[in-house]
Structure formats: C-alpha cells, structure tokens
Image: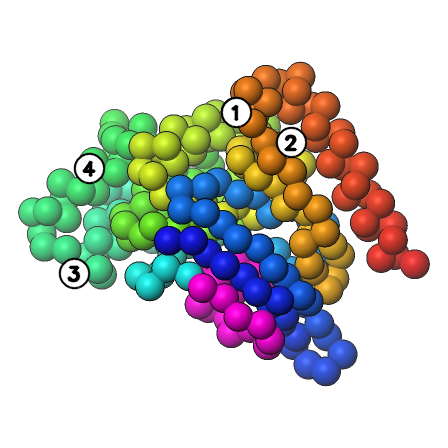
C-alpha cells in the first residue's frame, strides 16, 4: 500500500502553521528518511500519518490497517521482562496465549535479544531497550512502521550497530518504514530516499535517492551527507531572516 500525502497542512492556531503544502509518496516496502531542523514539523507529520493528529488541510492515503509507531523513548513497563513487554502488545491485539508467547519469543530472536528475554528494562542497556521497543512495534504486524528519532539518545557505536540490525529486519519483514531524524549521516545510511524538510512551516524542499552501494560505503555516505548538510544549513539560514 502506497502512502500518499497531497498538499498537507497543519496549524495549531491562526498564526501557528507547522506544516504547509506537504506532498510526497512512499512506496510499499520502501525505507524513507525525513530530515530537517528541529521544530520543522517532522514528528507532527508522522503523527498525522499515524492517525494521531488530523491534518488542517490537504489529503492523505494510508494503509487501511494503520501503522506501527516507534518513539524516541522506548517507554517499556519496568515491572515486565523484555518478553513480557512484547507479549503484552500481542495480548492487546487479541492474540491467544500460546501463539502470543511463541510470537514474542520469535520477535525477540529477530532483534537478537533471545538471551535477554527474561530481563527487566533496568537490566538492559539503552540499545537493548530500543530493540525491545522495535520488537514491540513489529508485533503490531502492520505494513507501515513509523520511527520518530528512535536512536537519537544512543551513543554512536550502538547507533551504528542498530542501523545494521534495522536494515536486516526491514528486509526480512518487507514493511515500509518512514524514519524521522535530524542526523544527516543516519538518514543517508538508512534511507533509500531522503526527503529534506524546510524550517517551519515544514514542507518537502529537496529529495535524494540513495543507491545501496552508497548506503554501505562509509566514504560515500560521508560525501553525500556533506552535500545534504549544505542544503540543510542553507534552508535554516533562509528561514532565520
């Protein structure tokens, strides 16, 4: 199912436009990164796609069975184990007991946390907690996964490791991913496409297609990240005056 945004706008009051004239298409199975300065409306756009916020203008087409959402904060229940947190999400979906336990185990294995299934959140590192949150999001079994800066609070080495894991899981699951970030290198490393948003009111002002050979070549990632950073700085300066 393709996600289509047509001239989308969002305002929180007469003089507070957050998004304006956002038009974009996201193909089934595609990994797209939304990049822009803080406050440009990236998270608001994800909320609209998820159905958490209504648009003020324009139209959108999204999968009928909705999207799974992964936030920056994993927000795990501290009294439940990693397995329990994932199993609870399945229980809320109405999955039966035996199937639920097996599926939770399968999902934790997918994010390489099978050995830590019994641990509670305080016994897990930041990267491991984000893996549990990813398994929980995947448990929703939606064709679209929305990710709002999920790795922003992690150190660089952990983030790089999770980039590789996320790409593997994306290819295995076949889902579409729309990934919000303000980290240019992260966007180039992960996205098949990178969409650059202007400062508020946010709209799509540039786009780059990222071939696989570029995304997996650190020097090529650095070169393209430098080019995109130049455009981002120009956009920020333009809106600062």
196 left or right of 192 in image: right
Distance between the Cα atoms at labels 1 and 3?
38 Å
The x and y percentages for residue 132 are: 35, 41
**Mark 2 residue crowding within 10 angstroms, few (<14) / some (14–19) / many (20+):** some
Q: Quick check: 175 left or right of 53? A: left
Mark sitting earlier along the chain (3/2)? 3
Would you place residue 200 above or below residue 56 in this image? above
Residue at (57% x, 39% y) in the render = 193
Crowd tier of the residue under label 3, counting other residues whose Cα lies within 10 Å: few below 14, some 14–19, many 20 or above: few
Q: Is residue 32 visible?
A: yes
Query: SS at mark 1?
Result: helix
- Image-quadrant location for residue 39: bottom right
Nearest to N terminus: mark 4 or mark 3: 3
Residue 94's label in the rendered image is 3
Residue annotated with mark 1: 212
Q: Which residue is mark 4?
A: 105
* Residue drawn at x 20%, y 36% as measured from the top left: 106
Disc assigned to residue 185:
2
**Foreground: disc 1 or disc 4:** 1
Q: For the residues marked 1 and 4, what is the alpha-carbon distance in whole angstroms? A: 31 Å
- What is the x, y in percent for residue 90? 21, 53
- As measured in the structure, the alpha-carbon distance from the residue carrying label 1 to the one carrying label 2 is 14 Å
Classify mark 2: helix, strand or loop: helix
Residue 47 part of the magenta segment: yes
Q: Earlier in the sequence, mark 4 or mark 2?
A: 4
Mark 1, Cα crowd under 10 Å, few <14 / some 14-19 / many 20+, is few
Mark closest to the chain's N terminus, 1 or 2: 2
Measuring from the top left, give residue 81's x and y in whole percent: 26, 43
Say if mark 1 contacts mark 4, CB within 8 Å. Answer: no
Question: Which segment did they paint magenta?
Answer: 44-61
């Amino acid at each position: 199912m393709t996600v289509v945004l047509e001239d989308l706008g969002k305002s929180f009051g007469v003089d507070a436009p957050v998004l304006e004239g956002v038009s974009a298409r996201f193909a089934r199975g595609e990994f797209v990164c939304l990049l822009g300065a803080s406050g440009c409306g990236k998270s608001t756009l994800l909320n609209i796609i998820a159905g958490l916020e209504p648009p003020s203008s324009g139209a959108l087409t999204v999968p009928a069975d909705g999207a799974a959402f992964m936030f920056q904060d994993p927000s795990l229940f501290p009294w439940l184990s990693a397995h329990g947190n994932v199993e609870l999400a399945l229980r809320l979906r109405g999955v039966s007991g035996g199937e639920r336990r097996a599926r939770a185990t399968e999902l934790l294995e997918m994010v390489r946390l099978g050995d830590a299934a019994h641990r509670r959140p305080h016994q897990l590192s930041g990267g491991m907690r984000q893996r549990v949150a990813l398994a929980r999001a995947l448990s929703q079994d939606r064709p679209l996964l929305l990710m709002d800066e999920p790795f922003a609070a992690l150190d660089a080495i952990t983030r790089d490791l999770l980039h590789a894991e996320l790409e593997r899981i994306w290819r295995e699951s076949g889902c579409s991913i729309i990934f919000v970030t303000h980290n240019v290198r992260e966007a180039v490393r992960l996205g098949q496409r990178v969409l650059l948003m202007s400062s508020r009111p946010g709209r799509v002002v540039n786009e780059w297609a990222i071939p696989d050979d570029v995304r997996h070549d650190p020097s090529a990632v650095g070169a393209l990240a430098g080019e995109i950073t130049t455009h981002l700085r120009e956009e920020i300066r333009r809106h600062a005056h």
